[in-house]
Image: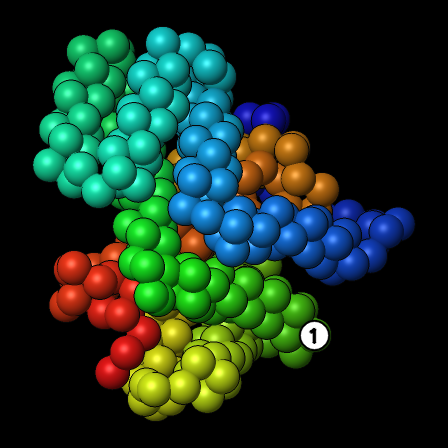
Amino acid sequence: MTRTKTLPDKDRGRPAPKRPELGIRIVSAALLAAVALAAVIVSPWSLLVLAIFAGAILAWEWGKLVREEGFDTVALIHAIGIAIIAVLVVLKRFDLAFIALVIACCAIWLASQAKHVWWSLAGFLATALPIAAMLWLRGDPAYGVPAVLYVLVVAAVTDTSAYALGRLIGGPKLAPYISPNKTWSGFVAGAVAPALAGYAFALGLGGTSALALALIALGLALACQMGDLAESAVKRHFGVKDMSGLIPGHGGLFDRIDGLLLAAFVAGLIALREAANPGQGLLIW
């Protein structure tokens, strides 16, 4: 992770890449998607293992970003906190999960230096809450699998359509100071395509309103794009291009799932309408 005072505009003053960046992104995303799909479908416990592993990577990347320390004491608390909360959510001990969340926040507060404390807490909450939401959705015995798949499909379609069509169509920049490569055409494509995917998902699922799932997909897609922009703003603040170099074509795990994290949190809020059966609360209208 290279730090600079400002992030370079990748489209300015640089020769065209030797390898097709879109193809690399698609291959990397496909491999990650295969792992995620297997974890979701097999059981809540397989998703739990993936969540704990992902939580540790996210803690490490956030530590590198805000404290330039990588896996330091705060990152260890961050990772352990996510693991404990995730296990308790799968066990449906939501009371203990909340207590663990509060304890982890207090521990991060005490272990962080004054100039890092708010950023460290923000990183923990931005990862722990979405991970808990996804595991909570998966815990619905009837609609857990389709609910998580729905969120994953919307996030994947949002990311791919916004990137591909934004590059293809071009046009005015969406937020040139925050993320110089994002365009309004990509933003619109990243909203319309997921809405269509949500409509199709509802038709395949049956027993629900296709219009409702299209509108929810639109909302989740907007959350994905806001999450992406928020992460870009944070990286610009700290003067880095990527959170890490773990994933070819994407950078770090945070760079790949920044939108998914916020979308998962929003999906969890929507699912509260049927707290006993969150998958149903998200999908059945």
Residue 9 versus residue 147 in the image, above or below: above
Task: For mark 1, give the secondary structure.
Answer: helix
Q: Looking at the image, which residue is at 66% across and 69% down?
A: 164
What residue would you read off at disc 1? 168
Q: Is residue 233 left or right of residue 249?
A: left
Along the line of sight, the residue nearer the viewer: 148 or 180: 148
Q: Is residue 211 left or right of residue 241?
A: left
Q: Residue furthest front?
A: 141
Q: Looking at the image, which residue is at 22% across and 42% down?
A: 92
Q: Is residue 61 left or right of residue 166?
A: left
Q: Looking at the image, which residue is at 43% across and 54% down?
A: 260
Along the line of sight, the residue nearer the viewer: 6 or 151: 151
Q: How is the image coloured?
A: rainbow
Quarter occupied by the N terminus: top right
In x, y percent, where is residue 27?
74, 54
Residue 17 versus residue 234 in the image, above or below: below
Residue 17 versus residue 149 in the image, above or below: above
In x, y percent, where is residue 262?
34, 53
In x, y percent, where is residue 196?
49, 85
In this orientation, does residue 174 appear? no
Along the line of sight, the residue nearer the viewer: 226 or 212: 212
Task: Identify which amino acid the numbered label 1 is placed on.
Answer: Leu
